[in-house]
Image (cartoon, rainbow, N blue to C red):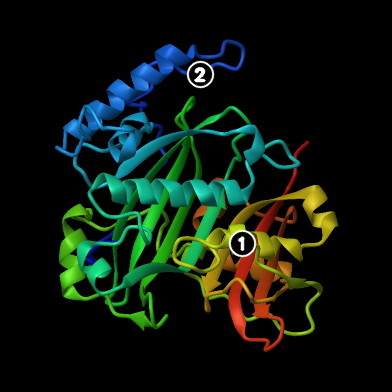
C-alpha cells in the first residue's frame, strides 16, 4: 500500500538464501524443539526487532490485549522499517490430500502477515490495515488482483518465513508483495503479489486514494520500488474471459457464514476454493497447483449463489506466454504443465464476480 515511483527502475528481489535473524536453532523432524526455549527465544528476538524502530508493545498489558499478542508473534519489522517478516509453523489442519499446505492455507497466511505488518506500524486491523483518515471517511481496502506462485509446498511441521511490504500502484490503489522461504534451508518456496483499491464501506463504491491517505502510509514504503516478480511475469498478464460453454462447472455454490470477513463480504481466500471446485478430479489427482491469478470484479454477499466454470487453455498459449516469464527460467515448463481459465458468476443474473487463470505441474510421487 505505498508510493508509486515509476521514474526509478524497479529492483527485482533475488533468490539467494538469507540467514534467519530470529531462529538460532533450526527445527529438526527427528528432534522436536523444546517449547520453553523456542518461545522465549522468539519473544526476545521479536522484542528486539520492534525496539529497533520504537514500535514495541509495553511490557505489561492488563488482561492480555494487543500488546501481549505483539510479544507472542514470531514476527518483526526489518531494521529499515520498510518490510515485515513472520514465521509460521504449518499445522495438521492446514494440509490437504497431498500432505502439504493447501493454497488456501498459503493465501490465509499471506493475509495474516499483511495485517500483522499493518498493525506493527500502527494501522488498524479493523477493516484490514485502515489508516486514521480511512476510518474517518468509512473507507476500506478490497482486493482487485491476487497472484500466487508456489515452487514447493511446505508440509505439516515445516516452518515458513514470510516477508511482506507495500507500495503505491498509481492513483487508484496499492500493491502488496510477499516472499515465502523455508526457514530451515533459506530457499525461496513461493512468491505473491496483489493489488488493492479503496471502497466506501457504506456505498460499496470504489474511491481514488487521496493524497491525505497516501501521506499516512508513504513513510512505510520502500524508497526504491521493490517487486517480488519481474514486470514481464504472468502476474501482470491480462486474463481472457472464459467462453461458454465451459469444459467443467460446479453450479449453485453458497457462501457460508464463516466465509464472511470483517468487511461484511466474502473473504478473497474463499474465491480460491470456489475456483478449484470446478477443476476436474483427474487433474487434482495427478497435478498440483503452481500458479493462480485472480481478478476480483464484484464483491459477493452471504445471500448470493455462485457458479464456478473452468476450461483448459491450449498448451501452445501456455508455452508462448511463459517463454520470458520468471518461473520458466528457474523451474522449467513443458508438457507436464497444464493451464486453465476460470470464471465465477452470480447464478441468477450471470454477472461476473471473478475471473482467473491457474497453471498446474505434474505431481512427482
The residue under the point 31% across, 56% down is 166
Which of 182 and 116 lies nearest the eye of the viewer?
116
Residue 37 in percent (x, y) is at 41, 12
Vertical placement of residue 71 versus 41, above or below: below
Which of 258 and 113 lies nearest the eye of the viewer?
258
Q: Is residue 319 visible?
A: no
Which of 315 and 216 lies nearest the eye of the viewer?
216
Residue at image mark 1: 257
The residue under the point 45% across, 52% down is 111
Which residue, as the protein is rendered here, is positioned at the far bottom?
349
Vertical placement of residue 22 versus 315, above or below: above
Residue 7 in percent (x, y) is at 20, 68
Pair 2/1: label in front: 1
Q: Is residue 37 left or right of residue 324?
A: left
Categorize mark 1 by other alpha carbons within 10 Å: few (<14), some (14-19), many (20+): few
* Label tally: 2
The residue under the point 83% across, 57% down is 281
Residue 200 in percent (x, y) is at 35, 77
Vertical placement of residue 202 versus 277, above or below: below
Q: Which comes before the other along the chain, label 2 or label 1?
A: 2
Which residue, as the protein is rendered here, is positioned at the far front?
63
Q: Which mark is residue 27?
A: 2
Q: Is residue 142 visible?
A: yes
Amino acid at each position: 500500500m505505498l508510493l508509486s515511483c515509476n521514474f526509478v527502475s524497479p529492483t527485482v528481489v533475488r533468490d539467494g538464501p538469507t540467514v534467519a535473524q530470529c531462529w538460532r536453532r533450526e527445527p529438526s523432524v527427528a528432534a522436536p524443539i523444546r517449547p520453553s526455549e523456542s518461545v522465549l527465544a522468539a519473544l526476545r528476538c521479536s522484542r528486539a526487532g520492534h525496539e529497533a524502530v520504537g514500535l514495541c508493545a509495553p511490557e505489561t498489558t492488563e488482561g492480555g490485549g494487543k500488546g501481549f499478542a505483539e510479544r507472542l508473534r514470531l514476527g518483526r519489522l526489518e531494521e529499515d522499517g520498510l518490510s515485515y517478516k513472520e514465521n509460521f509453523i504449518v499445522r495438521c489442519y492446514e494440509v490437504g490430500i497431498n500432505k502439504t499446505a493447501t493454497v488456501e492455507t498459503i493465501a490465509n497466511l499471506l493475509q495474516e502477515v499483511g495485517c500483522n505488518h499493518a498493525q506493527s506500524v500502527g494501522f488498524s486491523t479493523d477493516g484490514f490495515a485502515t489508516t486514521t483518515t480511512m476510518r474517518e471517511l468509512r473507507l476500506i481496502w478490497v482486493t482487485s488482483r491476487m497472484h500466487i506462485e508456489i515452487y514447493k509446498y511446505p508440509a505439516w511441521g515445516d516452518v515458513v518465513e514470510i516477508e511482506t511490504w507495500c507500495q503505491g500502484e498509481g492513483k487508484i490503489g496499492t500493491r502488496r508483495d510477499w516472499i515465502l522461504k523455508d526457514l530451515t534451508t533459506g530457499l525461496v518456496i513461493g512468491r505473491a503479489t496483489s493489488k488493492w483499491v479503496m471502497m466506501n464501506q457504506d456505498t460499496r463504491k470504489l474511491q481514488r486514494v487521496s493524497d491525505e491517505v497516501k501521506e499516512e502510509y508513504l513513510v512505510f514504503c520502500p524508497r526504491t520500488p521493490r517487486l517480488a516478480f519481474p514486470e514481464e511475469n504472468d502476474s501482470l498478464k491480462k486474463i481472457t474471459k472464459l467462453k461458454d460453454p465451459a469444459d467443467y462447472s460446479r453450479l449453485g455454490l453458497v457462501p457460508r457464514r464463516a466465509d464472511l470477513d470483517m468487511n461484511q463480504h466474502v473473504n478473497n481466500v474463499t474465491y480460491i476454493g470456489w475456483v478449484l471446485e470446478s477443476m476436474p478430479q483427474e487433474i487434482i489427482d495427478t497435478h498440483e497447483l503452481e500458479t493462480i491469478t485472480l481478478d476480483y470484479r464484484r464483491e459477493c454477499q452471504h445471500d448470493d449463489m455462485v457458479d464456478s466454470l473452468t476450461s483448459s487453455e491450449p498448451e501452445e498459449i501456455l508455452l508462448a506466454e511463459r517463454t520470458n516469464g520468471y518461473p520458466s527460467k528457474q523451474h522449467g515448463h513443458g508438457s507436464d504443465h497444464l493451464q486453465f481459465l476460470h470464471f465465477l458468476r452470480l447464478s441468477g443474473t450471470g454477472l461476473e464476480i471473478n475471473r482467473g487463470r491457474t497453471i498446474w505441474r505434474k505431481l512427482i510421487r
